[in-house]
Amino acid sequence: MEIPDGHSDVPAGKTASVVTHLQMFERPQERAERSESSWNLRKVDPSAPDRYRTLFRRIGEDWLWTSRLLMSDDELRDVLGDPLYEAYVFEAEGQAEGVVELDFRNEDECEISFFGLTPAMVGKGAGRWMMNRVLELAWTRTIRRLWVHTCSLDHPRALDFYIRSGFVPFRRQIEVTDDPRATGLLPRTAAPHVPLL
């Protein structure tokens, strides 16, 4: 389907975003990072889906992340517990402050399904530290491609961060979805930078 040039109406109760897909085919040179002795990545315990959802919400509410909130406990346990799926919590001072999910279920590739930090950690160097660990984890496996996507609803520096990390854009899409604030999944005060119609 071809999208016409110009403006297209987005129905009330929906959001529209531009999704950019990025990829790399070899591990890039590691970028300089700041490191704190208390920073740590630990594997997610799939038996505690509510605890994971709470962290997911803390990170993603301002960016209208919803997919993990829509899953049943069993569905979320199945994803997080899949041997070809690695989910990690970023900890600082013993507190959960970030998530990253690596999906190896497609042969020869890895998708970074989620990568995010709580507002308290943004701008402190934790994202670079976490990305360096992610690149180590992903390229330790025998993969041909590592990829990720971000959208115009995400943090305004997300796209540039991925490009600076060595990813190259290769595809762009328009995504229209239900606005989770209109459905009641997220509070109406979430993502104030995105108008709620």
Image: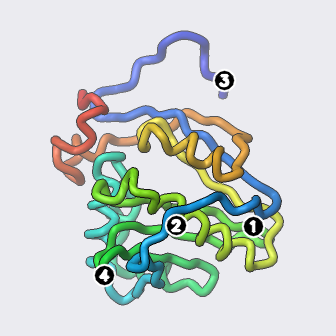
Precedes in sequence: disc 4 or disc 1? 4
Disc 1 target residue: 109
Q: How many marks?
A: 4
Q: Residues within 10 Å of mark 2 (few under 14, many from 20)?
A: many
Precedes in sequence: disc 1 or disc 3? 3
Disc 2 target residue: 130
Residue in view at x 33 percent, y 79 percent? 49
Which quadrant is the C terminus positioned in? top left
The disc labelled 3 sits on which kind of residue? Glu
Disc 4 target residue: 94
Mark 2–mark 1 distance (CA, rounded to whole Å): 20 Å
Q: Are marks 2 and 1 in contact (CB under 8 Å)?
A: no
Answer left or right for 107 relative to 128: right
Q: Quadrant of residue 9?
A: top left
Mark 3–mark 4 distance (CA, rounded to whole Å): 49 Å
Q: Nearer the viewer, mark 3 or mark 4?
A: 4
Label 1: which secondary element: strand
Precedes in sequence: disc 2 or disc 3? 3
Examine the rendering and report whether any part of residue 113 can be seen: no
Q: Nearer the viewer, mark 4 or mark 1?
A: 4
Residue furthest out toward the top: 6
The disc labelled 2 sits on which kind of residue? Met
Precedes in sequence: disc 4 or disc 2? 4
- Mark carried by residue 2: 3
The disc labelled 1 sits on which kind of residue? Glu
Mark 2–mark 3 distance (CA, rounded to whole Å): 38 Å
Label 4: which secondary element: loop
In the image, residue 190 above or below residue 197: below
Mark 1–mark 3 distance (CA, rounded to whole Å): 29 Å
